[in-house]
Amino acid sequence: MAETTADPAEKDLPPHRYTAALANEIEARWQDRWDAEGTFHAPNPVGPLSDGFDEVADLPKTYVMDMFPYPSGVGLHVGHPLGYIGTDVYARYLRMNGRNVLHTMGYDAFGLPAEQYALATNTHPRVTTEANIANMRRQLRRLGLAHDPRRSIETTDERYYRWTQWIFLQLFGSWYDTDADRARPIAALEAELDDGTREPAEGTNPSGRPWGELSTDERRKVLNAHRLAYLDEVPVNWCPGLGTVLSNEEVTADGRSERGNFPVYRRPMKQWMLRITAYADRLLDDLDLLDWSDAIKTQQRNWIGRSTGARVDFATAAGPLTVFTTRPDTLFGATYMVLAPEHPLVDALTAPAWPDGVPGDWTGGAATPAEGVGAYVDAAARRSDLDRQADTKVKTGVFTGSYATNPATGTEIPVFVADYVLMGYGTGAIMAVPGQDQRDWDFAHALGLPVIRTVAPPDGSDDGPFLGDGPAINSGFLDGLGVDDAKAAMIDWLVEHGHGTATVQYKLRDWLFSRQRYWGEPFPIVFGDDGEPRALPESALPVVLPPMDDFSPRTSDDEDSEPEPPLGRADGWSEVTVDLGDGDGERTYRRELNTMPNWAGSCWYELRYLDPDDDEALVDPENERYWMGPRSDDDCGGADLYVGGVEHAVLHLLYARFWHKVLFDLGHISSREPFRRLFNQGLIQAYEYVDERGFYVEASQVVEQDGRHLFDGREVSRQLGRMGKSRKNAVAPDEICERYGADTLRLYEMFTGPLDQSRPWDSTAIVGMFRLLQRIWRVVIDEDTGQVRVADDVEPSEETLRVLHPTIAAVRDGMEGLRSNTSIARITELTNHLTSAHPDGGVPRSVAEALVQMLAPLAPHAADELWARLGHEGTLIRGPFPVADERWLVADTVEVPVQVNGKVRARITVPADADAAALEALARADEKVAALLDGAEVRKVIAVPAKMVSFVVG
RNA sequence: GCCCGGAUGGCGCAACUGGCUGACGCGGUGGACUCAAAAUCCACUGUCCGCGAGGACAUGCGGGUUCGAAUCCCGCUCCGGGCACCA
């Protein structure tokens, strides 16, 4: 890279030029001053951070948030702060315009990466995490971000995770009342069960005996089965190589762990689950209240996956077989049934012998159904989910030898076991309608099963299933009805005859919340001798993560090994003697040894920023209502702006919404949603270079020659990708700050495009923004003397005013719309105008000051410095920000194009307020236009005032 | 396969709801300053034809609507992202 910074030691450089050295000096000085003066403090209405609230009490308020980072050991690269700078510009702009703005930054520091990093460096995660956070704080501070430092939180801080645990106790201490459609305290459920106004929910009382006859232990089990946090035996991703279960996102497409590439096995284990499914409808419906992109909303809708349809019972020898279908209208076309291999009725429905005349394709070549089904089920069990889904074109399955009765037709239809039906969705069994379903069609054709069409396909189409709308055929009382009407009619019939019910099905599963890791929040839970979980009292919080020398998970290469949470080895920790206040007195209990997943801390941090020092509550209700409360009847509340990467489209954002709604239901907060408006920032991409062996080479050392890219003389291939240390294309912000200063980096990152757009990093283009700052500097400061060179008591020329005021309007527009690239372009134009209009200095003070004010959100250090040198006390943090004067927004005269038959043939300068008739006359008077119109018949004239004139000639 | 985005000079992008395509910046070319270079400043810079005035062609491709389309409609291509046997 060319050496673009000037060394101030060099003799012939003007002594007061804006150089990197000067920029760095100014930036460090202002950062210290901002810190010392608490410039970025945003006062709360009440509590420890309420100093100075009186001064801002009448101002409108805005809460701006970034998705907080995980403090990685390699530090930030220039891609990370893109969103942070974007929100900072926005927040500073609003502050200058008289708003009380809350903007801060925290650290999401629990989780497997931190633990792995600690293992790799053989240091305790607490030590590495704290060092990483310190480094990241230093890097971010250097960028001049106007964060309220008092509100910064770390999820690994005991004072923070005490409240994470407290929220878990809220989840454990409540249940979802489907009648009230909200969560309520479990004590309310107990009271209603006691006084007989409520029965235990379906599936929560295995004995089936009335509540009043249950023992204390049995009652505890019933209550536990209602809770929003509950223990359940579920299939999980067990990774013996890492010694922990993993979330689905932590498993690669080929069934191995993302970290370490170890095999992952599905197996059932008893784990903590959070009942997010109870909130499925509200999570879905409330999306309509949010100012989020359709892309993200669609992803959340798909993830929740609500389908309406019916449950239908089919009579079999083993009792009713229930299926879920979204197409009850096609019941007359159900010609066979399929069970998932794991379905509980598989054994019961496996007949002792094949019926007479069974086709060979159906038996899998087995002598008996038991043999055929057994072999098929075993084979399916050995295949991973991913493997089973890899080749979806080929359908396999085996006949059970049993039949079920189609309730609509009374026909006996064969029951198969096939792995294209998944146990995890619906009831794990389907009615197969090959005429209207591609998968059923494929299976029917593979095994020679009959097809009955129940929706008439359009003319002649007889190839494949028909999924569209059309009149019902072959369907008895439904014939002639369209799909929607037929569905409704069939559901009515099913209900009336006791064969089924209308129902809603979701793809969303309850949230697996246990990890066998050390570096996470311990659960505030203990177990009694009965194996049932009990909550620790609030007074026992925080349950502090015990210090351990050996915190590594117990790993193994044995698929059947048992998970062994590291906390089980913490001396004297796994048991605790405590009085739970439940009447049992002081007893010894076993602690829960799992920890929470790293999503936990990020599920509610938006609330803790509001009141980080509150030891009485997770957030004082008044502070929450002030910053996040609903502002009108149809407002869901929440942070005003949340900026982050699109990669958190589903998980983090869904989990956080879920917790927020639980806290809302229980009356702890007034907002129904955590993030009113979400904005996904683009990515900073970088070229990565790969040599002939497929290894990354250091991007900074690649040279371009005749369109080829050479590293060390060898040609390498180039592609655009993510920036990252491992790809050897990372550029650190520190490096750019040293070379140009933070203000230049901020301007450059904002200039390369609107915030939502990804853009490649180009280190050579930064100099443009550096030059801009130099020019602005020169407008105010004489490079030779260091003296202010603006002209006092001089009115700006009309020409300058006509540049200045549209610039102000456009700059505001860009900043409000998170498109400061356009603001910077307009500031550049103004600067260029001033530079050429006043080559020897003497820019009117009022214009120079407006320029500096507009610069302040973007390059706050340089702006505050220039503001001070212009003779003002203090910083520009609270403005003023210039306001455009309408008078100068519209020009007296404008140049408009004149079109003849759609082509621009001339340009004329006309009064801005010329009406259509005047415009036409002026256009006709133009020499060139007159020549073109001469002798031609003008058939039509369109004249749009101040825009254009168009002649149609024939 | 389905669902979202996107495509404008050599590059990043701009053009508010149909009205002068390419603002602003990088890069490039030429110049000023300098012994020289760097830095800085100034000018030019979509493509093609023409000595020139000027003209033609240009917003991924093909149609359409319109006096007028980067913008609206229909049909494609390519790129990026998400989901994927969800009954």
Image (tube, coloured by chain):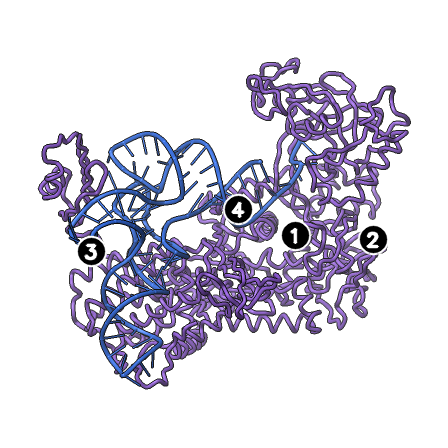
The chain coloured purple is A
In the displayed structure, A662 sits above or below A725; it is above
Label placed on residue A249:
1
Find residue A628 and report its horizontal and vertical position in percent: 49, 54
Residue position marked by numbered label 2 in the rendering: A531
In the displayed structure, B26 sits above or below A336; it is below
Secondary structure beneath dot 4 equals helix
- The amino acid sitting under disc 2 is Gly
Label placed on residue A888:
3
Find residue A827 and report its horizontal and vertical position in percent: 30, 62
Secondary structure beneath dot 2 equals loop
- The amino acid sitting under disc 1 is Glu
Q: Are marks 3 and 1 on the same chain?
A: yes
Q: CA distance from mark 3 to mark 1?
A: 56 Å
Q: Colour of chain B?
A: blue
> Which quadrant would residue A327 be assigned to in this image?
top right
Q: What crowding class fits label 3: few (fewer than 14 Cα within 10 Å), some (14-19), or many (20 or more)?
A: some
